[in-house]
Image: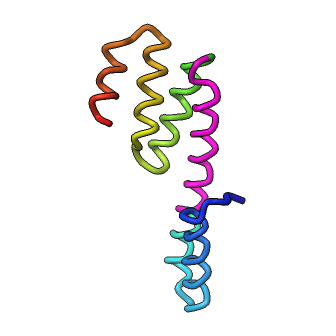
Amino acid sequence: MIQDSRVERYLEVGDRLVRKGKFKTATAVYSRYADTCVAERCMEKARACVGTNPVQALKALAEVERLVGASGEGRRLMAEAYTELGQPEIAQRYLDTV
């Protein structure tokens, strides 16, 4: 399980909604928790391979953005990956959005 208090908050809120009988809303919250967990693992993968396998890092970062949206760290890692791939113009576009 993720040990980040911001992420764990999803579980707390979902549990509270279940206790109140708001199952549909609780399901949405739990789904968001699952997306966040997967996104964190993808971000870890991207951090680990951005210098050695930038294509894999870009795939992982695309999944992060799909699941939870763009982040400053994700944009910086994308820029680093594109720099590794010899694409400084594309890298600069990502840095300009940070």
Nearer-the-camera pick, 1 or 31: 1
In terms of depth relative to the viewer, which is nearer, 69 or 74? 74
> Quick one: quadrant of the C terminus?
top left
Look at the image and say whether residue 42 sits in the magenta stretch: yes
Q: Quadrant of the N terminus?
A: bottom right
Expressed as whole percent of the image width and height from the top left, the position of residue 13 reads 54, 77
Q: What residue is rendered at 58% in x and 68% in y?
A: 30
Relative to 6, residue 27 above or below: below
- Figure check: 21 above or below 49: below
Q: Is residue 62 left or right of residue 43?
A: left
Residue extent of the magenta highlight = 32-51
Residue 62: x and y in percent read 48, 35
Which of the 4 image quadrants contains residue 91? Answer: top left
- Magenta stretch: dominant SS? helix
Q: Is residue 41 above or below residue 84?
A: below
Label count reads: 0
Residue 73, quarter of picture: top left
Instruction: Answer with left or right where residue 75 lies relative to residue 10.
Output: left
| Furthest residue toward right | 1
Please name the residue shown 44% across and 27% down the image. Answer: 78
> Residue 36 sits in which quadrant?
bottom right
The residue under the point 47% across, 29% down is 77
**Horizontally, is 14 left or right of 85 in the view?**
right
Identified at 56% across, 47% down, the residue is 39
x, y percentage for residue 45?
63, 34
Residue sticking out furthest to the bottom: 20
Q: What's the image's color scheme?
A: rainbow
Magenta-span inclusion, residue 45: yes
